[in-house]
Image: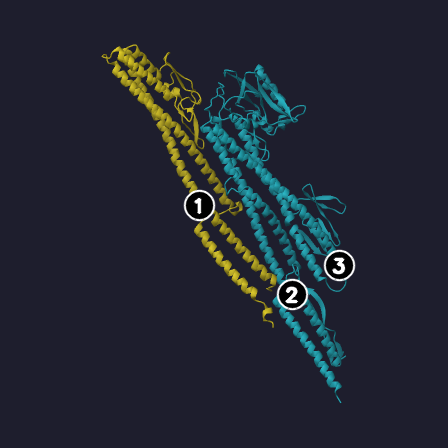
Amino acid sequence: MRITMNNIYGSIISNLDKLADDMRTLNETISSGRKYTTLSDDPVSLISALEIRSIIDETKQYERNVTYGILWTDSAEIALRQTDEILSRAREIAVQMANATQSAATRASAAIEVGHLIEQMVALGNSQVAGEYIFSGQKTNIVPFTYDSVAGTVTYNGDENDIDIRVGRNNSATINKNGKDAFMDGNETSNLFTYLIDLKEALEGNDVSGIQDSLGNLGDAADYINEKIADFGAKRNKLDMKKYIYAELELSNTERLSDIEDTDLAGAILNLKTKEVAYQAALTAASKVMQLSLVDFIQ
Amino acid sequence: MSGVNAVLSIARTALLTQQMAIEVTSHNVANVNTPGYSRQQLVMEPNNSTTIGLGEIGTGVQGQAIIQYHDKFMTAKVNQQVSSMTGFEAKKSSMAVVETLFNETTEGGLSELLGQFWAAWHDLGNNPSGKAERATLVGRAELLLDHFQGLYSDLMRLSTDMDINLDAGIEEINSLTGQIADLNVQIIAADQGVGAANDLRDKRDYLVQQLAELMDINYFEIGSGAYTIMSNSGHILVETDKSWDLELNGGLVYWVSSTGAEVEMGSGDVQGGKLGGWLAVKQEIIPDVLGKVNNLAESFIREVNSQHSQGMGLAPFTSAVTGSYGVATGATHPIADLLYGSEVQAGSLKIWLYDAVGTATEVSVTNAGWTTLEDAVTDINTGLGALGTASIYTEGGKGYLRITPAAGYSIGFSDDTTNILMAAGINTFFDGYDSGSIALNSVITNNTDNIAAGTIDSTTGDYSLGDNENALALADLQIQNVDIGGQSATFDDYYNALVGEIGITARGYNGGYDFSRNMVNQLGQLRDSVSGVSLDEEMTKLIQYQQAYSAAAKLIQSSDEMMQTLLSTK
């Protein structure tokens, strides 16, 4: 082929351009830490990266939901454990006071303590998380239990709805128990509160057989509350499991994302070095070719 | 004739001819860097010989013609590739802008904002009565709709940029075709004299290449030496001394015929060159991308509103509820004219009225074939009785559905299977219908308590602040397949596919550009190897001609000496 000035200079320029562009791209991948910086660099990887990133975001959200759920179930469990302690104390009192040797006066003072226990239990039933009542079903803004010490009644004001949170795709977890279920066994006339109120009234009336009746009821109540505590334990286990799985998932997906997105630094730097050498070689060759001209040899 | 004079005469032709050859060589050297220049060469031939007794004897040399080294076939090939290259270049650079708009490789893309929007619904689901969660949700929704609007306005701006490019491009095309027609005339005139008008042809070929950069053309040389140039679709642009103009009118490109009639040239008629690239960007790429973004926005608004309208805020509405979507006022207000009117179907909805102490009264309304808002108003009024009124509220030439509770009552909605609430924009979250118009319903921005995280119990009419059912249902939209532009996909999937498509299209254009640029380079090298000037070659020739010139001068000296010899004979 006949080589002309345009051929020589044109190819020098286009080859140097190409090498410079390759170096720029490599430089960009190294300095940004990303294999690609625009969509067209690698659309297929980008789509998988987008999908993985939304999975990670989703996982993080479920983790948040689970953490929130754990806050609720833990608070409920603590309230129920304390309720269990109150019930034990009430049983202790009942055992002591059922003894025929106790006087009416000691029974009356024990009645005052039971009164306090009722108040404490009502307060536990009215436990809150971040300003919301956890035992009032979905009516979280409404005080679930009100105690009328004169009439000797505890009224439930909440509803019987569950609060569900999403802990996965199409996967919900109930994080509450309405107060009627947790404290009243679904029965407004015979429940943990009425047992205590009955005990209090029996103590006030110095009614030994009434106290003995309460003793039996309080035993049932302890079984009942322990069953509820176990329920929350099971809920908590489910949430813990989810949390563990999501933490693992987040980690493995972050790794996958990094595999797709992040620059292989060692490889990129090696490539850059290679290009640098090629660029220098091209420059040297170009300067040699450019120096050659017949004009220099014509005297 | 023969003799000393003949030698002198031959020497004279040699001197003049070699001098002329040196002149042509200098012209080549001078034009080594002139774009479009084809190297020239003096073709020499022996002069007519004369007959002497012995036979023919030569009479020296003469220049026969100055020819051009020009490969027409290769030039046409280069021009074709140039059109393809510049077309890809125009598409590539516009696609680079589109790519930036959808750049999901960095933070803050639509995908991330969508994710945050759904996450905000989850957070609201965790704490349905939370003010902070409501404010966050509104904030995230605003970021998202800003992004949608940004995509819309940036794509529209790109479209306007194309108009500006087209305008400038067409002006240049018209100027080029005019100049080519002028050159045609000059070349015909020059050709009728002696030899070919080499430099004029180079100039014309250079103009043709510039024209090829702007649009794909077909051209050929007719007998007189003039070029006839046509667009790829066969619209004639130059014929001998005449040229036909293109015109931009209302964003469309027209070819103007001799009679002044305008013929539209779409992206199918001009496929290559910058003009072809710009037309493709304006008429194909932008409408496609924007169409998909709009499909996404439209479905997103529809699905969120549809679910939102089933729910209930922190409290029922205490005053009139007016829809955000209206129908132009006429004799009636057809439901089909609502932006989402086609979604309205047979079914029923429950309207709940709460008196001062919160006692709920259920009003069930059935749609058994509403065609106008008036039909709906009539049925709702029948149901409401004295508890409230439905009406059509007119503002700005449009009628909106309005439901007003009676004094002392407040109002809520549930179990709407008719979609009338969504279509009319009652108890909805978003307003608007595409990426340009998407906005928050003012009912939400005025009071975030109206964000419907909960639902009304469909049997008792009860509602509670801890109810998160609707918030979770809204959060679930993230993972549900919905109808987007006729496809069933999740919002994420649809958007990811769009992003992928943009990436692949851009990659295709980049590849096309690289390929055609390489082709132009290679074909250009082949063309230059014929037409280009090599300085070394010209130097060699210079010396060659110079030596011939010196030798011819020697001839004169020799003949002079011969003459002297003769004259000095005594």
Q: Mark 1 points at which residue?
A: A259
Of the residues shown, which amino acid type is indicated by label 1?
Answer: Asp
User: Is circle 2 on the same chain as circle 1?
Assistant: no
Q: Mark 3 lies on which chain?
A: B
Q: The cyan chain is which one?
A: B
Marks 2/3: CA distance?
A: 27 Å
Label 3: which secondary element: helix
Q: Which chain carries label 2?
A: B
Quarter of the image where the N terminus of chain A is located: bottom right
How far from the left and from the top, in percent, is residue B216? 65, 50
Q: Do the residues under discs 2 and 1 have CB atoms within 8 angstroms? A: no
Answer few, some or many: residues within 10 Å of disc 2's Cα (few below 14, many 20 plus, some between 14 and 19): many
Left or right of residue B497, residue A73 in this image: left
Disc nearer the start of the sequence (2/3): 2
Q: Mark 3 points at which residue?
A: B188
Q: Name the residue under label 2.
A: B29
In which quarter of the view is residue A212 placed?
top left
Answer few, some or many: residues within 10 Å of disc 1's Cα (few below 14, many 20 plus, some between 14 and 19): few
Answer few, some or many: residues within 10 Å of disc 3's Cα (few below 14, many 20 plus, some between 14 and 19): some
How far from the left and from the top, in percent, is residue B288? 59, 40
Quarter of the image where the C terminus of chain A is located: bottom right
